[in-house]
Image (tube, grey):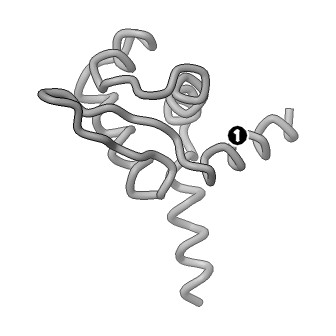
């Protein structure tokens, strides 16, 4: 039962077009800040923050402090998710 809940958390983590866009952006350009992601996708800062929080909870995003900003990159699990999603196209 626990395994199913973990899978559910993972799927819910990327079950949004904006979150998939964020993963794809960070695949191409790792180590972006929240501000850079919001700007690149032309979305509100708070919206980007919420989506990135959900991605981190799902284990799809890593955060690293860099002075006053936080840098983000995708995990290997996120790379597998993106591969899977491309196979569905």
Quadrant in the rendering for residue 41 = top left
Q: Which residue is mark 1?
A: 82
Q: Is 40 placed above or below 20 here?
A: above
Image point 59% across, 90% down: which residue? 1
Q: Quadrant of residue 57?
A: bottom left
Q: Residues within 10 Å of mark 1 (few under 14, many from 20)?
A: some
Residue visible at 40% across and 50% down in the picture = 56
Q: Residue furthest front?
A: 67
- Residue at position x 19%, y 28% in the image: 69
Total residue callouts: 1
Q: Measured from the top left, where is residue 15 in percent x and y?
A: 57, 46
Image location (x, y in percent) of residue 76: 62, 50
Residue nearer the viewer, 62 or 48 = 62
Percent across and percent down for residue 87 are 87, 40
Callout 1 secondary element: helix
Q: Position of residue 19 (x, y in %)?
A: 50, 35
43 relative to 65, above or below: above
Q: Residue at x 56, y 26 (%)?
A: 21
Which of the image's four quarters has the C terminus?
Answer: top right
């Amino acid at each position: 039962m626990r395994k199913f809940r973990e899978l559910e958390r993972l799927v819910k983590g990327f079950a949004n077009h904006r979150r998939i866009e964020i993963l794809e952006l960070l695949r191409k350009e790792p180590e972006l800040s929240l501000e850079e992601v919001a700007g690149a996708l032309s979305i509100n800062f708070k919206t980007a923050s919420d989506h990135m929080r959900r991605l981190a909870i799902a284990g799809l995003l890593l955060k690293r402090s860099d002075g006053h900003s936080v840098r983000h990159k995708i995990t290997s699990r996120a790379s597998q998710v993106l591969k899977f999603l491309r196979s569905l196209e």
